[in-house]
Amino acid sequence: MKSTVETIILVRHDVSSANIDPSVYKQLPDHTIPLADPHSERLARAGVLVRSLSLAADKTASWCSPYVRCAQTEAAVLEHAFGADAVHIRRREAFLLREQDFGDWDSLTDEEALQKLPDSFAKRQRLTDNLGKFYFRYPNGESRADVVQRIILFFGKLHRSDFSHHIVFLHGVSQRAFRMAWRNQPVDWFEEEPNPANASVLLIRRDTHGAWHEEYMSGAT
């Protein structure tokens, strides 16, 4: 079956309360951490950028990480982008888009990890080259390679969909994992590529020759 995918838009969640105050990571489970401002100008600008693409709402699917900050980002961006027509967008929660799971390392600073998980910390320190870091699996958590593998599973959902346009709300690491897998980038690309800015909008679409291209739309900071 031929894929109907024509356009993919990757939107990273806006600034969370933990981005501003890291102590929040010790107070709330990661998936419940909200945005610092659900009505920020960044979200409005992201919505305007999406609106500029003139996507038909009834041909557009929205996919969202189950984390609260992503769901809040989705709600705000779709409202700004589609207005009343947002009700016609097919919205789906996708746990495969979640943030990287740091397991026992979750909410720990490097100094705390060194004290509480000395063996794991020493192992990560030994993996100084890019390839090693990519494969390091946090104790009871995930490696970056694990994130890429589950994002590849998500691709199956896109290709089985009847929709032409897809807006995907996700996290910094999962966004890089998506791009790496979609465009068959090597491991060193993943490690050298920085995380996207909060509320940034990355457009991925196919040209007339069938080749995929990506570009950050200007205006989201």
Image (cartoon, grey):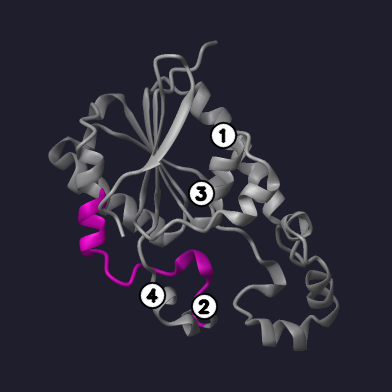
| Residue at the limit of the structure toward the left, as seen here | 84
Q: Which residue in the protein does label 3 denote? A: 175
Residue, x 41% and y 61% (percent of image)? 68
Per the model, the C-alpha gap separating discs 1 and 3 is 11 Å
Q: Amino acid at mark 1?
A: Trp
Residue, x 68% and y 42% (percent of image)? 186
Q: Earlier in the sequence, mark 2 or mark 1?
A: 2
Per the model, the C-alpha gap separating discs 4 and 3 is 20 Å
Q: Which residue in the protein does label 1 denote? A: 182
Secondary structure of residue under mark 1: helix
Q: Amino acid at mark 2?
A: Tyr
Q: Earlier in the sequence, mark 4 or mark 1?
A: 4
Q: Which residue in the protein does label 4 denote? A: 17
The x and y percentages for residue 155 are 56, 32
Q: Earlier in the sequence, mark 1 or mark 3?
A: 3
Per the model, the C-alpha gap separating discs 2 and 3 is 21 Å
Apparent side of residue 86 relative to residue 36 in the rendered image (left or right): left
The x and y percentages for residue 81 are 20, 43
Please rate how many residues cluster around mark 4, counting C-alpha atoms within 10 Å: few if below 14, some from 14 to 19, many from 20. Answer: some
The x and y percentages for residue 126 are 84, 70
Q: Earlier in the sequence, mark 2 or mark 4?
A: 4
Q: Amino acid at mark 3?
A: Gln
Residue, x 56% and y 36% (percent of image)? 154
Please rate how many residues cluster around mark 3, counting C-alpha atoms within 10 Å: few if below 14, some from 14 to 19, many from 20. Answer: many
Per the model, the C-alpha gap separating discs 4 and 1 is 30 Å
Residue, x 61% and y 37% (percent of image)? 181
Secondary structure of residue under mark 3: helix
Region rendered in magenta: 27-46
